[in-house]
Image: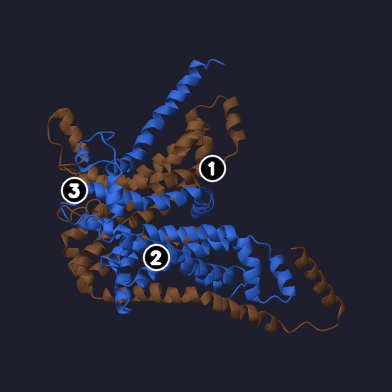
Chain colours: A brown, B blue
Amino acid sequence: MSYIQVKGAMTAITYSTSDVPSPPLSARLSTPQVWGIVMLAPYLLVFLAFVVYPIGYGLWLARHPASYVALYNDPVFARAVVNTLIFLIIGINVKMLIALFLSGFFVQSRTWIRSLSVLFILPWAVPSIPTILSVRFMFNPEWGVINNLIFKFTGEDGPNWLNNPAMGLTLAIMVHIWKSLPFWTLILMTGRLAISNDMFEAADVDGASWWQKFRFITWPSMQTLYLTCTLLSMIWTLGDFNSVYLLTGGGPADLTHVLSTLGIRYLRLDQLDLAMASIVCAMPLVLPLVYFMMKRLSR
Amino acid sequence: MRVPTLREVGTEARLLLIGIPVLIWTLIPIYHMFLFAISPKQDAFAGKLWPDHPTLNNFRIVFNQQHYFLRDFWAQFGNSVVIAVAVGALTLVIATSAAFAISRLRVRGGRTVMNLALFTYFIPAAFLAVPMYRTMGNYGLLNNHWSLILAMVTIASPYAIWVLKQASDKLPLELDEAAIMDGATPLQLFRMVYVPLMLPSLVAIGTYALLLAWNEYLYAFLLLSKDTEITLPVALGNFLAADDSPWELLMTTGFIYALPPAAVYYAFRRYMVGGLTAGAVKS
């Protein structure tokens, strides 16, 4: 470090004492600009080959109006749209409200709560495939642990959980919440920790209730973060393929598909144009969210 | 020792009333998996909280590939490792140089590239999967590890560039100026000033890309299909295709597969939680 500093100072002195005019602006700028383009090139190549080309090719495949008519007439598509909306509205709100509540729990300073928070992020830290399969086995009607317990205590056979579309979708939403709850709780915790403690102390002096403290101190300083989290969570929930596909596989009778699994279903049925058309149909839901998030991040 | 007041006991009890359900909810699927992994076949289905005869026999069967479903276990494990490491390394190279070009060299159009990258980051990968699959087919890369590596680099790079750009914007410009005064070329600036200073962020981003690739199921299952070429998660998914699949072995394999990312995650917890994730929703 010191070597660089000394050398830098010497160069600076040389420059300031000599009367040599500095090189023209273009010559000084061009080298970094050229290097900049060279260093940006790998990503640009990846972007052109694996983002621009696939999107362009996909849109080209989805160009026929007939695909959209076929899609409109396919009951599986209508069902998937409804399922997606249910998944989004229930999944996100339940998840974010619990995360908001738990973030208040985890900021309490207790040793055991800190240890619990270490275990609490496990669902986020482990890959989703084995844990989703584990849940799938738990709910197996014949050998699963849930129905075994039901049989043990009541002497009756439990329901065929995943063979019921409403139950299957509910369980997929629960798996999704299980997986992503730790992440959002952590994010909301950082929001809570950023609030100055003085305000809570002042409120305590004034005898404010728990609800008043939340309503007038916590919530006003967290509502922007909460909204951003909800929107980002919406994008990620829209793209949650694993929770549905690995738990129910879209079944029974294709009644639990969501938009993110529908494309793969059509691909497997060799209906490529329908696969692409279904993805294009999801864009009115995705693009406004993407636009909003980009606005937020590039500020 | 001070005797706690009734009020304090009440608060503690209420906290426990939240904490215990949270603990049970969090651990059930993982514990269920672990229980299967250490149970002999006949015990696994009995619905007990702890097996009568816990055993490591399942792990022995998996490691020795002594089952029809497991005959390529080590090859698949190796595929997962190779692909994850390649994605981590490639993403690092591509994202670091792009972030350097945008943030330090202020290359013209850098901001546009950053926005395009962010756009890619926010489009859910599940919606890009079908066109990506066709694209790889057109390029003749299907069933080749490169298809998955390149697809995952495409998915991992945008966020990597964004995080690295944020981090490099914080480095003082005087450093670059001093180096340029000394006659450093942009490449020397990159190698001798930029990379050493960015090392913590680079470690975090490399880990991020590595885990993303290790955990990926959808792209892996679309792009690779030969039993000896697939990654572990795809192999786990294939277990489901058969009715008579051996659950205890599937759960054991899943447990082995889940261990490395969990270990890495906990080792880098500070980066992952503090630096990486919070950046996504910074208000």
For the residues beneath circles 1 and 3, the answer to whether they share a chain is: yes
Residue B190 vs A26, above or below: the answer is: above
Nearest the camera: A64 or A251?
Answer: A251
Nearest the camera: B273 or A209?
Answer: B273
Image quarter hosting the C terminus of chain A: bottom right
Q: Quadrant of residue A63?
A: bottom left
The amino acid at mark 2 is Ile
Q: Position of residue A181 (x, y in %)?
A: 39, 44
The amino acid at mark 1 is Ser
Q: Position of residue A200 (x, y in %)?
A: 57, 32
In the picture, the disc for residue A165 is 3
Judged from the image, the secondary structure of the residue bearing numbered disc 1 is helix
- Mark 2, residue position: B83
Question: Which residue occupies 20% across, 41% down?
Answer: A144
- Mark 1, residue position: A221
Image quarter hosting the N terminus of chain A: bottom right
Question: Which residue occupies 15% across, 29% down?
Answer: A154
